[in-house]
Amino acid sequence: MDWSSIEGNREKKGPVTDLELLHHFGAHPHLVLLQGVERGRRRCSSTVKVSGARRACLLGFGSCNSCQYGGLPPRTLPCSTERSLAVNSINNVVTEDNALGWTLPSPQRKLPRRVYRSNGYLLLYCNGGLNQMRAGISDMVTIARHLNMTLVVPELDKRSFWADKSNFEDIFDVDHFIDSLRDEVKIIKNLPKKLIRDIDNKIVKVHSMPPVSWSNMAYYLKQILPLARKHKVVRFLKTDTRLANNGLPVELQKLRCRVNYDALKFNQQIEALGERLISILKKKTENFVALHLRYEMDMLAFSGCSHGCSEEEAEELTRKRYLVEWWKEKEIDPDERRLEGRCPLTPEETALILKALEFGRDTTIYIAAGTIYGGEKRMAALRDAYPNTVDKEMLLSPSDLEPIRSHSNQMAALDYLVSLASDVFVPTHDGNMAKVVEGHRRYNGFRKSIILDRKTLVEHLDLYQDGEISWDQFSNLVQQAHKDHMGQPKERKVIQGQPKVEDYFYANPQECLNHGRYL
């Protein structure tokens, strides 16, 4: 991989300027850089050189002196001088403008609380893994806001495949979640005590239900709002994909983004570990790739994919699929599924694809995944092709990971942070993490994400491994297939009546992006 292509094609020689870095590595798309910033701007000692640390500082990943990442626009830069208060028209966050023209968040001021008559309380039981729950919570906040309901801090899934017992506050900063949305919706940690007593005494009956998948706001206004007013408390038993990708008012789409990219901030413990991981990686190398290698038991069992597995392993995966009752599809042809492009790439296939995309042997690759099925035996080909392949277990000490090791969602949160900070993000399957991280990287300035066309790749891989095409032909075919799959600005594909097939909102939240600046 030619890393200069990531930084942009520069005709000018000499040091890279802050403005060039912001353009090529992704200042926040909502950030407005006023005229005259380039002229006479001050520099902090931490931002004099063009370095990974400086770039991380400018982009809001990692930290350097007084620079820190604040989630939503605008970002904080050091050297602030004169200040004036303002309210951001996009997200209503109280902000400050400094003499350099950057808009700065004001940490001392809380947003004004939105006052409204509540139509009832909304309880949530979020289902799925970390990123499925993250998207679901973003949808549910938006629904609560539209229905003028009071939201109770969500309950996270503890019964799924991962059996993670984490509560909301074990992963996210619960106070930040509540305070950062107070101008939109009232969020409380628990139901009022009197209401709990009324529920216990059966004076009030909680109405529990799973909302209909991919519903628009008309459904929630016509079907859910009357239930909320009648029962006072509504509990949603599922939160995944319960809101349509398209057809919502722009202000609600922007609220989905605000929740996902600002309000759902990880707690201090996870943020600190994430910063440590990113710092270690940046000390090892100027650039690194985050590889979401989704070759894990749950994905293989769920998808029915067993390419490269032994007969015993294939049988184990089938048994696991039948044991999980809420996985509806049981009889699956693994070869047919692979040819359809619906299987995660194997580690061996991934090594060939990365090489075909011209990532050099010295590229540092961070494995953003859990336990790879088949262990180190299955990782051998990838590690042989890329010796600088690392993961969180290799970079952090056992004592660092001990508090969260048995909590898969907290471990996944570390991978999420590293994936956001990586120079390139490559998922080998289009699951929830792949989609949500892709969208977050778009939101952070269209940072490069290589979205692999697995159906096309499987065809090319088989031709190459069968000796029907040469390596040069294979490499050229792979590169041509992905020249427009790098996370560039594009319109979200809408297919009426087929929400599962059309582009996912959180993979390309175009209503929240400023395409023009990057086209």
Image: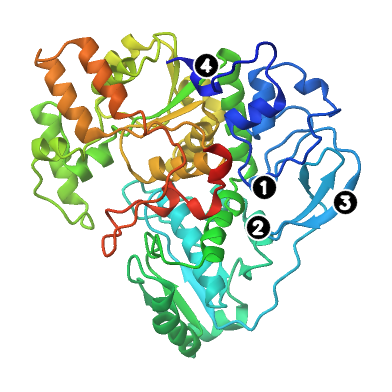
Q: Can residue 407 be seen in this view?
A: no
Amino acid found under the numbered disc labelled 3 = Ser
Element class at badge 2: loop
* Crowd class of label 2 (few under 14; some 14 to 19; many from 20; radius 10 Å): few
Q: What coloring was used for the rendering?
A: rainbow
Upstream in sequence: badge 1 or badge 3? 1
Nearer to me, 258 or 26: 26
Q: In which quarter of the image is residue 499?
A: bottom left
Q: Nearer the viewer, mark 1 or mark 4?
A: 4
Q: In which quarter of the image is residue 290?
A: top left
Residue 364: x %, y % from top left: 46, 16
Nearer to me, 484 or 342: 484
Picture residue at 44% right of the left edge, 51% below the top: 506
Marking on residue 4: 4
Residue 329: x %, y % from top left: 15, 53
Element class at badge 4: helix
In the rendered image, the vertical position of residue 253 relative to residue 274, given as above or below: below
Q: What residue does disc 2 label?
A: 90
Q: What residue does disc 3 label?
A: 84
Residue contact between numbered discs 3 and 2, judged by CB atoms under 8 Å: no
* Crowd class of label 1 (few under 14; some 14 to 19; many from 20; radius 10 Å): many
Upstream in sequence: badge 1 or badge 4? 4
